[in-house]
Amino acid sequence: MKPRICLIEDDSIMGEALAERFDIEGYDCDWYQRGREALGPLTHKRYDLVVSDIRLPDIQGDALFEELRGTGQALPPFLFITGHGAIDQAVKLLKLGAADYLTKPLDIPVLMEKVRSLCARAGPAAAGEPRLGLSDAMRRIEAMLPRLAANARTILITGESGVGKEVVARAIHEVAVPDGDRPFVAVNCGAIPEALIEAELFGHEKGAFTGAARERRGCFEQAAGGTLFLDEIGDMPAAMQVKLLRAIQDRCIVRVGGERRIPVDIRLICATHRDLKQMVREGHFREDLYYRVHVVQIEVPPLRERREDILWLADRFLAEWQGDGTPRRLDPGAERVLLDAPWPGNARELHHCLERACILSGGSVLTADDLCGNPGQGGAEPPRTLADHLAASERRYITEILAGNGGRISETATQLGISRKNLWEKMRKLAIQARTAEDGDRP
């Protein structure tokens, strides 16, 4: 059966062209020129994707999306088309659960690439707020969650401290166990004294050592049927690495002071901010253990490389803040301060910054002053010269415009008012990475 697309576009020329292109590409397409015309079909027909303009003659695309979400039914992915003046609306829709957006004038090859990717998803996606973020990197990880939950029994999550490795691990567990009736057990391997880590992981029998007044199940047994998350596995003592390797290979443990082999059915997720491969070369981490935990690796990028997630995370942190019961929100100045900060401590530092602001501020609107000086500086010195400051500002602005245009060089150059060649030269000079998909778009 062909994938079916619901196209909502009031412009007759564009709508006809898109419907014809979808047909050529092998998709069935129902084209509607008004949002209200599509409401009925969207509630009783199955679509693999909805491609909708935001500005429609009878109802705005965002209002249409929210009305459909209000029905409680599972919705297909929504891909919105917007002009540059409505990008704020598109970002709001991403926060509500839309799959993606593209700006006019449309880059048809990019559109078709997104259509193919979204239609390839298994079944209609349930609308809801993204789990991990709005950035391409986090949405790619989120798209992998169902496959990881269904097939991967050992996963390694890497990334700098504070990027949200445990958040990704919990998301995998929640997709695998949607009813929440199986345990998720998290252990920080670097926080447990070396003398106690074996008993903490594998448990102990009564009388195994002084103070062992009764038998105790370790983390492996506590996580049976669910997920065991070993954070900072790179800090695991060398002597314990051998025992951990055996437990992972056999999915069996032996309690301290015991002899009985106890099978444990777990999903094992490990995480580290260290370079395990380098640690193997230096002799600090066992090579056989490295290959055992490195079955599937997920790299979580630092927050400075996914700035689309900063305000999304801030909204979540503020929504979770309990404190005095006063809801908090950011004013535009505070949002700009957060977007400009480098966040060496990543999402954890952002969370602490907002928590401090909520505690110290008595108002419901947080300002730039409430954020206590220079958030995200992490002790770093400010630029020493005017040239340094100007280069940093130029780099930040170009990066933001690139992100807003989905990494497309031509559109970004047009918006900046410079040539593509000039843009590429600035990107090389400022060490701005271009997305792989754009490598062919060089001057």
Image (tube, rainbow, N blue to C red):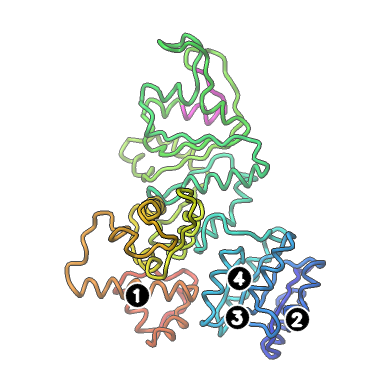
| Residue sticking out furthest to the top | 207
Q: Tell me if residue 199 comes above or below residue 88 in the rendering.
A: above
> Which residue is painted at 45% across and 48% down in the image?
323
**Element on which disc 2 rests:** strand
Q: Which residue is mark 4?
A: 114
Disc 3, disc 2: CB below 8 Å? no
| Quarter of the picture holding the C terminus | bottom left
- Provide residue 282's location: percent of width, then percent of height: 30, 39
- Provide residue 215's location: percent of width, then percent of height: 52, 14
Q: Quadrant of residue 261?
A: top right
Disc 3 residue type?
Answer: Ile
As measured in the structure, the alpha-carbon distance from the residue carrying label 1 to the one carrying label 4 is 25 Å
**Element on which disc 3 rests:** helix
| Residue sticking out furthest to the bottom | 13
Q: Quadrant of residue 86?
A: bottom right
Near mark 3 (Cα within 10 A), the count class, few <14, some 14-19 or many ≥20, is few
Residue 249 is a magenta residue: yes
As measured in the structure, the alpha-carbon distance from the residue carrying label 2 to the one carrying label 4 is 20 Å
- Provide residue 306's location: percent of width, then percent of height: 43, 62
Q: Nearer the viewer, residue 352 or 404?
A: 352
If you read the primary sequence from the N terminus, does the residue marked by circle 3 or circle 1 appear first?
3
As measured in the structure, the alpha-carbon distance from the residue carrying label 3 to the one carrying label 1 is 25 Å
Q: Which mark identifies residue 427? A: 1
- Describe residue 50's horizontal placement relative to residue 339 as left or right: right
Range of residues picked out in magenta: 244-255
Disc 4 residue type?
Answer: Lys
Q: Which residue is mark 2?
A: 32
> Which residue is painted at 82% across and 66% down in the image?
44
- Describe residue 384's horizontal placement relative to residue 332 as left or right: left
